[in-house]
Amino acid sequence: MKYELDNIYCVDCYEAIKDIPDKSIDLIITDPPYLIENTRAGGHNDFTEGGKKSIQHMNDELAEGRFTESVRGDVLFPELVRVMKAINLYVWCNGKQIPMYLDYFVKEQDCTFDILIWHKTNAMPLFNNKYLTDKEYCLYFRKGGYCAPQSYEDAKTVWDMPINATDKKRFNHCTIKPLSIIETLVRNSTTGGGTILDPFAGSGTTAVAAKNLGRHYIGFEIDEKWAMIARNRLNNTQADGQITFITM
Ligand SMILES: C[S@@+](CC[C@H](N)C(=O)[O-])C[C@H]1O[C@@H](n2cnc3c(N)ncnc32)[C@H](O)[C@@H]1O
């Protein structure tokens, strides 16, 4: 295969995935760009510079980091299905993207699905004519894929957890996911030695979880900055998942 196991590649996943052989991947865990609307023009949030970060600042950060485009499902979804041994996919998304994923994976591919939720216990107190932004969705699609939680804790579908501010600061990635959640998914849906693909690797959380638990990984990330951070993170991760040293 063109891409070797246990590496992060700085590539465009829409092209790179074409070089992954059919039925070679046990599990995909991924966190594609979110289709986030920029609230700059007349947004209803009133959080201003008095806080740690303004909404404007966060919007700029998201746009600059290619997090605001949506995923190109017409190109990518058939490729995800092709490379998996059996459909076994966790994909993070926001509420607006849910119908698109259900249309393809449930209606077209006949998968079963679950909606897993990261409930952020310390979300910002913004509720002016709206509910709190206090959750993130992780959709799980499966058709023959392996899922065998070994404990009550691992079988939960809601994770109550604060925003992972320390990791965000340490790895400088504004949509980094909590490592403990991703490790749970890896444990539940692969056996030792399995291979996990993350086409939108960001700071490498999926790869670190795979490495910590003795699974193989392949990560694609289009931005060299994040690809470097992911590689450094992996190189400096001890077997116990602790980071020893980081260069940026
Ligand atoms: C939501 S972030 C993933 C964050 C990751 N879950 C983590 O914990 O660090 C999405 C990532 O996809 C990357 N990306 C966007 N378009 C891409 C593409 N066409 N190919 C590969 N990576 C892409 C972005 O640069 C960004 O780092």
Image (tube, grey):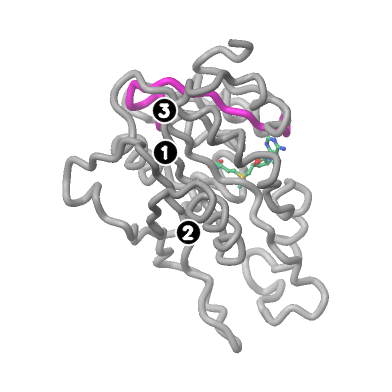
**Mark 2 to mark 3 CA distance (whole Å):** 22 Å
Q: Name the residue under label 2.
A: 137
Front of the two marks 1 and 2: 1
Q: Residues within 10 Å of mark 3 (few under 14, many from 20)?
A: many
55 relative position to 107: left or right: right
**Measured along the vertical axis of the image, is residue 21 above or below residue 220?**
above
Element class at badge 3: loop
Q: Where is residue 36 in the image (x, y as percent from the top left)?
A: 69, 62
Query: What whole-number distance in Å separates the C-alpha atoms at marks 1 and 3?
Result: 7 Å
Amino acid found under the numbered disc labelled 2: Tyr
Image quarter hosting the N terminus: top right
Q: Which amino acid does label 1 sit on?
A: Asn
Considering only order in the chain, which callout, 3 or 1, is on the residue closer to the N terminus? 3
Taking the image in four quarters, ligand 1 sits in the one at: top right
The residue labelled by disc 1 is: 88
- Report the side of 237 relative to 57 (left or right): left
| Circle on res. 110 | none
For mark 2, give the secondary structure.
Answer: strand
Q: Earlier in the sequence, mark 2 or mark 3?
A: 3
Q: On the image, numbered disc 3 is attached to which residue?
A: 26
Q: Is residue 43 left or right of residue 8?
A: right
- Kindly report which numbered mark, 2 or 3, lies closer to the viewer in this rendering: 3
Instruction: Tell me if I can see residue 236 in this picture.
Output: no
